[in-house]
Amino acid sequence: MYSNNNPLFTLTISEFKTLSRILIEEALEERSQLKKKLEESEIEKEEHFTIKELAQFLSCSKQSIHNYKKAGLPYYRIGRKILFEKRKVLSFMKSIKTKRIIIEK
């Protein structure tokens, strides 16, 4: 019978180092590819709002959204359409809360 303590084959130290290096490089490459895939999927899932959708999301008026824009709410344009990224909106709203910026009406 075989025992768990008996090796199936023996390696020299240099062979072990080479094998270890190859396995680590493969694992790191696999990890970086997985990380890239996750980042790409997060970008695709990035939620964007129009002014109307953002007003509904924040439970405020469209005019309030325009006031937030004047106060520094990040947005971008595609043609005539104005879009807001959800994560940037949330970050801005947190900064307003902590800085207590007063939005002029």
Image (cartoon, rainbow, N blue to C red):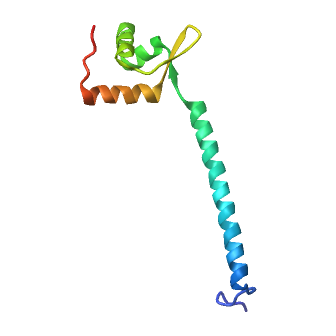
The residue sitting at the bottom extreme is: 1
Q: Is residue 72 above or below residue 26?
A: above
Location of residue 13 by image quarter: bottom right
Residue at image position (67%, 63%) is 25
Identity of the residue drawn at 59% across and 10% down: 79
Q: Which image quadrant: the C terminus? A: top left
**Tag count:** 0
Give the percent coordinates (x, y) of residue 83. 51, 17
| Residue 58 locus on image (x, y percent) | 37, 19
Q: Residue at position x 67%, y 77% from top? A: 17
Image quadrant holding the N terminus, namely bottom right
Q: Is residue 98 above or below residue 5?
A: above
> Toward which corner of the image does residue 22 lie, by quadrant?
bottom right
**Residue occupying the far right of the picture:** 9
Res. 3 image quadrant:
bottom right
Left or right position of 4 against 75: right
22 vs 31, left or right, is right
35 left or right of 75 in image: right
Residue at the (41%, 19%) spot, across then down: 57
Apparent side of residue 35 relative to residue 97 in the rendered image (left or right): right
